[in-house]
Amino acid sequence: MSGGVLYVYAITDSFPGTIATGLHGANLRAIEGGPVQAVVSEHAVAPEPDVDQLWAHERVIEDLMKASTILPMRFGSTVDRAEAVVAMLKERQEEFTALLEQVRGAVELSVRAQLPSAAEPVEAESRLGRHFGPGTTYLLERAHRQRRSEDAAELIHHPLAALARRSMQKAGSGDPHGFKAAYLVDEGAVEAFAEQVGNLNATLGELKVSCTGPWPPYSFASEELG
Amino acid sequence: MSEDRLQEARRRKREGEREAWRARRDASRERQQQGVSRALRDRDVSLLDLVDRLLAGGVVIHGDITLAVADVDLVYVGLRALISSVETIERDMGVSLSAAGPSLKASAL
């Protein structure tokens, strides 16, 4: 290929053959590098980055997941030569084989919730008397709210993590009251997980817990992330 | 007079944004319905999760074979902007796209 790019979708140890097509209907093929393979398609130019392509990337990954265990690549992973892919596979072989074992037979579920925030005033003064200045009162209230948020996060996270192989809480995007976590769950346990989310919604009152999935294991596809 | 025109322009802009948001929402739902049966997936919150996963998760190619890093960083910024504008519209319209509890329970696995 001259001047084109290879778009990389996933690392796998069991490429299922041509059951799926890639972005823009391109053929998928596997590049071997030891015991693991990278699933790629060839393109004259790098696929354009937009929301449609995000869904298209996701669709390819999901198709692959039906028949094999995979580590999904981050969107937009392109290389210019097959040799570069082979080098990466060989260099990171141990990492990839270990991670593939961790995600085998499991899917990722995403959970979000809005934690209690400043909307609910804390009666620092009535609890503590009026012995503090405004600065101290503010700090006490802030500490109290933070504890409430942390407690609520624990109420959500703990029972869900108990149903998961692995889990990770993610830092909210600038929102200290946004709970965001990913759970790596056995395929057979997805239903129980969904029921637990339903239970949480039934018992936690104003805390609304939302769950999406099953996703490919994006959040558990690298040692840094997981 | 000019104050009125300004308000009218603002109103039109808001309506345009809402229209664009609805179009994105509908397109997103359509895509999901076409996809694999997604037991738990719910409306637009899926788009937030999709963006989070595809642009911040997954295997990352390190070193000198990473050709698309600059491009993807730009995309990331662009999509973040898109997402935050959806959130802004959400707030302005007083609707919550992420209140997925009931539909979660309702969906058949």
Image: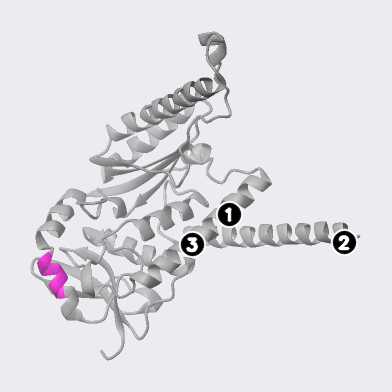
Q: Is residue A106 covered in magenta?
A: no
**Helix, strand or loop at disc 2?**
helix
Per the model, the C-alpha gap separating discs 3 and 1 is 10 Å
Q: Are marks 3 and 2 on the same chain?
A: yes
Q: Position of residue A105 (x, y in %)?
A: 22, 49
Q: Are marks 3 and 2 in contact (CB under 8 Å)?
A: no
Instruction: Answer yes or no: is residue B37 visible.
Output: no
Badge 3 or badge 2: first in the primary sequence? 2
* Left or right for B4, reference B36: right
Up-down: is B31 above or below B103?
Answer: below
**According to the image, what is the colour scheme of the structure?**
one colour
Instruction: Answer yes or no: is residue A59 visible.
Output: yes
Per the model, the C-alpha gap separating discs 1 and 2 is 29 Å
Comparing labels 1 and 2, the label whose residue is closer to the camera: 2
Up-down: is A16 above or below B26?
Answer: below
Q: Which mark is residue B29?
A: none
Magenta region: which residues? A86-91
Q: Which mark is residue B79?
A: 3
The residue at 81%/60% (across/down) is B6
Which residue carries the number 1 mark?
A: B86
Which residue carries the number 2 mark?
A: B2
Badge 1 or badge 2: first in the primary sequence? 2
Q: Quadrant of residue A133?
A: top right
Q: Amino acid at mark 1?
A: Val
In this view of the protein, which residue sits in the foreground, A41 or B37? A41
Label 2 Cα crowd, 10 Å radius (few <14 / some 14-19 / many 20+): few
Q: Amino acid at mark 2?
A: Ser
> What secondary structure is the magenta-colored segment mainly?
helix
* Left or right for A17, reference A181: left
Q: Quadrant of residue A192?
A: top left
The residue at 21%/69% (across/down) is B63
Q: Are marks 1 and 2 on the same chain?
A: yes
